[in-house]
Amino acid sequence: MDIPSYNKRAWNKQVAEGNRWTQPVDSEAIARARRGEFSVVLTENIPVPKRWFPPLRGADVLCLASGGGQQGPLLAAAGANVTVFDNSPAQLKQDQLVAEREALSLKTVEGDAADLSMFPDSSFDLVFNPCSTVFMADVRAVWRECARVLRPGGILMTGSMNPIHYIFDLYKMDEGVLEVTHPIPYSDLTSLPKEDLNEHLEKGLPLEFGHSLTDLLGGQLEAGFVITDLYEDYMLESPLHNYHPSYIATRAVKARL
């Protein structure tokens, strides 16, 4: 299966259905960001600490797999030179909508996060990647590309799903039942029973991948990053939130040569 093409269609569908992560920010949020009072998330609930950010005015920022009219426009309003990169053209249209509405200078580029070949080496000061590698089969390829396009000393901020989320039967989890079922790494394509996968594909839901901590964290280190901070967050609609966080957010710096 061509996973990027399938997930492109799936996320276009999510935009049409009004998924939370496809809803553009309002003018009031943009006005606050222009005053330096922006708030963005890498995971579901906890805002990214302000101390994680470099000075944004004039910084070159890649909002990676971050379409939807949310983080990119806010960082642009805060003074950054923002490029929003996403696999879904419908998601990118949300960023274009906010940019036009608020007279923001913001670029949008469509593509696969594992292939940033349209950008030269050392193009950005910050890569901001909200929880989206869950929709990518090869997360190590994403980290390698992030390292390549960042300048030495550049920052990678990313949100990831804790692999513990995927050890449970996801259908029963939706019903409030935690039943350990799957090994990690997880893939909708190979971990789900055939009938569940067929139902998933018929509904046009995005395909998900539960990566190991070795790939999520060790992969960043292997790509040349130094992880400087992290925090965890909870998926409140999941019964797992009573026991364990579902998300990990990390801040990493590209090592200087």
Image (tube, rainbow, N blue to C red):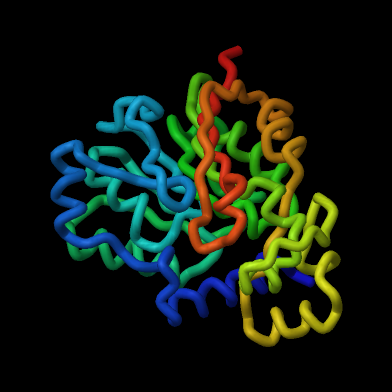
The x, y position of residue 143, in whole percent, is: 65, 38
Q: Residue at x 41, y 50 (%)?
A: 45
Instruction: Indicate whether 97 appears above or below 126.
Output: below
Left or right: 197 with respect to 33?
right
| Numbered label tally | 0
Quarter of the figure with residue 81: top left
The residue under the point 78% across, 56% down is 186
Name the quadrant of the C terminus. Answer: top right
Left or right: 166, with 240 as reference point: right
Tell me the quarter of the picture where residue 177 sits.
Answer: bottom right
Image quadrant for the N terminus? bottom right
Place of residue 76 in the rendered image (x, y in percent of width and height, measured from the top left): 28, 45
Up-down: is 257 above or below 66? above
- The residue depicted at 33 percent of the width and 31 percent of the height is 50
Give the residue at x 16% y 59%: 27
Location of residue 74 in the rendering, given as x and y in whole percent from the top left corner: 28, 48
Please determine whether, in this image, residue 139 is positioned above or below residue 123: below
Q: Quick check: 196 above or below 115?
A: below
